[in-house]
Image (tube, helix red, strand yellow):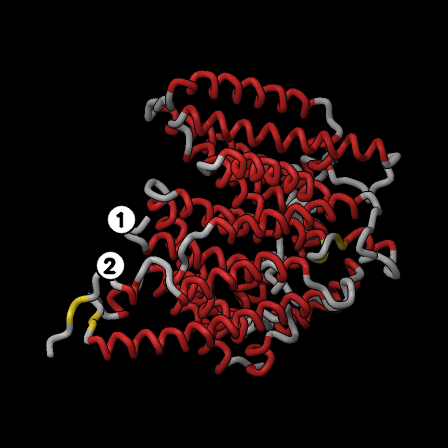
Amino acid sequence: MAKKKLKKNDTLTSNYNTANAFLNYYLVLMFSVFPLYYSNKYSHIRHDKLNVFLLLSCVLTIAEIIIGLVLLNERRRSGIASEKKWYQTLSVTDCAFASLILLYIISTLFSAFPGESFSGEIGRNNGLFLFIVYFFVYIIASRLFVFKEYVFIVPAAVCAIVFTLCVLNYFYIDPLGMLVGYSAKTAEDFTSTIGNKNLMSAFCCIMVPLFLVFYLNHKNTVLRYVYLGLTGLGFAALLCSDSEGGFLGIIPLLAVLLLYYSRSVKKLGMLFTATSVMLVFAKLVRLFSLAMGDKEKGFGALQKFFIYSDKSYLLLGACVVLAAALLIISRKGDKTLPKAVPIALGVVYALALAGMIALFAHYTFADTSSKLNSLTKFFRFNEKWGTHRGYMWIKSWEIFLTSGVKNMLIGWGPDTFFKAFEPYFAELNEKFANTSTNCAHNEFLNYLVTGGVLGLAAYCATFGSAIVRAFKKAKENYLALAFIAPVVCYLFQSTVNIATPITTPLLFLFLGLAEGICRKSKTED
């Protein structure tokens, strides 16, 4: 009997079935239990998050395999054939990610430390095993995701808690007792239920862009303003995480969104409204600081600008005026600005980037002695740059160049940076009083050393192709932009940060969700 073609309205491939529902339940748990769970304050928090992610992801994978086998059996019994073979549906992102996993398998097999490379136990647990789990989660999310509003109301509620805890902790208010028994240094570095300030900053860089794009595009007025409020609260949490890396994520993202929406008067007005709300929340942090008698952990230069500086009021005023003017103009319908606007904006960006490169080159190579203030110090790169990240970056590059052809191509093995950097531990301790390190504090450099140039190329191809696909799809479905914005923001901040099971699982989860939207046809949207 001839097999009949599978139709779009067929029960077996309906827009929402058991497999889709199971994925959404998984997402709810990842957006609720995962950020909030801890077992013993901060002492095991990385392993707490890792165990939750692995448990949920393994249950998801097993359940979806069983459901898939049942559906496949039903298809065979019904004589229904798919229109395409599985390999005909692969995207560039799928192939790049699969290549990354294959390269990591090869890297592990040829590593001098295969056991550690597989488990990642000498690093941050980002070994081959965890990347395989990331790949399964990506595949499931990219094939089975169907948007349901409740899935994203959950992270809104949970992030309100996480963001608020971050702000309270910064002023030594500790409702969960997370900081009790720790040293003053630990209390300054750790916050909320996430971990140290760099990880909290990375978490903000994942969730704030999601809420911002939802605000810009959501049709439900109440939810839109809920997401606007969370954007502001998330920015306050970012300020109170006191990590400059977060600004490397948020500010470029705002610039990207400004360029993306530069021809829409209404969207520009809403974007400036969101920026105004973020700046208002910075001033609310200042008011809260006054109420607490300014008893806080101490803000960095950028944080002080937004919270304390009078100049930030000028920035706030300009954003409010622009937002009001643009929204008034668009009251009778959105207006489309000429193509010259994004072109001009692109020129401004290029000039600004050129100026920053010039300053960086000047203070790094020409003027190495003049005293710089707390903001301009970022333009002088040396071993002390970025809490001695400069030293680790310089040595990481040396390790790559001197590690031999094999390691240059496929790396030392996933998450084995500790072993690669071991010869420099004595010098690191002598110069900066750090006895060891297991990461480069730059994810791209870290992947270059541990995965080689081929591994890094596959990693960049995975995310680069996903970003291109999502921005193209966003013209039809704003969810593509909502899910890729966290990825873009995370990648920017990852240039000064580390990959851990506390935040990186969310990166790959959103990668899968963005790919899932890109795979849908226009009619399915």
Q: Is residue 121 left or right of residue 508?
A: right
Up/down of 353 relative to 164, above or below: above
Measured as percent of width and height from the top left, residue 479 is found at 42, 46
| Spatial separation of the CA atoms under disc 2 and disc 1 | 10 Å
Secondary structure under the numbered disc 2 in the rendered image: loop
Q: Residue at x 33, y 42 (%)?
A: 476
| Residue 274 visible in rendering | yes
Up/down of 49 relative to 293, above or below: below
Can you tell which quarter of the image residue 41 is in?
Answer: bottom right
Q: Residue at x 68, y 72 (%)?
A: 423
Depth order, front residue of 340/107: 340
Badge 1 local density, few (<14 within 10 Å), some, or many (20+)? few
Q: Which residue is mark 1?
A: 523
Q: Which mark is residue 57?
A: none
> Sequence-wise, which precedes: disc 2 or disc 1?
2
Q: Residue at x 68, y 50 (%)?
A: 162
Q: Amino acid at mark 1?
A: Thr
Viewer-nearest of discs 2 and 1: 2
Measured as percent of width and height from the top left, residue 463 is found at 43, 56
Q: Residue at x 11, y 79 (%)?
A: 1
Disc 2, disc 1: CB below 8 Å?
yes
Measured as percent of width and height from the top left, residue 427 is found at 74, 65
Q: Amino acid at mark 2?
A: Lys
Depth order, front residue of 104/204: 204
Q: Which residue is mark 2?
A: 8
Up/down of 354 relative to 390, above or below: above
Depth order, front residue of 73/204: 73
